[in-house]
Image (spheres, rainbow, N blue to C red):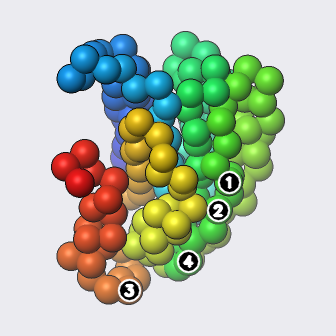
Amino acid sequence: MKTRLAAASTLLIILVALLALTLSPSAGAVPTSIEVGFLVDGSGSIAPPDFVIMKNGIAAAIENPNCVPQDGSLNLTVIQFSRSARVELNPVQITAANAGAVADTIRNMSEMMDATNYEAALNLAVTTMPLTSDYSAINITMDGLPTVTLRGTAATWALISPLSPAS
């Protein structure tokens, strides 16, 4: 239950943040392009029904034009992680024509079911996402601490620092 609530809350937060960024003028400019990377925990600690809830929630949001713009302004990447990470959805601009197919790709992900290594997911996201949009965000959907650490927390944050607005 805790995982389901966290997954639903995380998805709602990122979607509301995207909507706010799209509608609110910051420094006089509204972003015209947004990149979002969903890093989905497929480790063994995620119960299969909870994994289904996570992927179905993301897919349902993609199909709903009231949640996610379907005008090509959103570039979406989905990466699943466990002991390693793999790209489930290469960067794609979401349009009304492809939203259903993108959602189906997400729904068809099979859970990896191993250790928890979100550092591998962050590494893969930084090298997979184009990072050329007006705004880029990475959403990590997970249930706790990693069980695999490659280089430590400081190295991970240094790796993703190019994504922060301050850089």
Label at residue 90: 1
The answer to the question of whether label 4 and label 2 lie on touching residues, with beta carbons closer than 8 A, is no
Locate residue 5: give its quadrant.
top left
- Decide: few, some or many residues near mark 1? Use Cα within 10 Å; few <14, some 14-19, many ≥20: some
Which residue was labeled with disc 3?
Answer: 150
Question: SS for tag 2?
Answer: strand
* Residue found 53% across the figure and 79% down from its top: 83
On residue 72, the disc is: none
Q: Secondary structure at mark 4?
A: loop
Looking at the picture, which amino acid does disc 2 mark? Val
> On the image, which quarter does residue 11 sit in?
top left
Residue 100 x/y as whole percent: 77, 29
Is disc 2 in contact with disc 1, using a CB cutoff of under 8 Å? Answer: yes
Task: Give the residue type at disc 3.
Answer: Leu
Question: What residue is disc 2 on?
Answer: 87
Q: CA distance from mark 4 to mark 2?
A: 11 Å
- Kindly identify the residue that appears in the image at 57 percent across and 21 percent down: 69
Query: What is the number of the mark on residue 84?
Result: 4
Q: Which element type, helix, strand or loop, lies under badge 1?
A: strand
Tell which of 150 and 165 is nearer to you: 165
Kindly report which numbered mark, 3 or 1, lies closer to the viewer in this rendering: 1
Sequence-first tag of 4 and 1:
4
Closer to the chain start, of discs 2 and 3, is 2
Q: Give the amino acid at mark 1.
A: Asn
- Label 2, residues with CA under 10 Å away: few <14, some 14-19, many ≥20: some
Task: Look at the numbered disc 3 and give the secondary structure of its residue.
Answer: loop
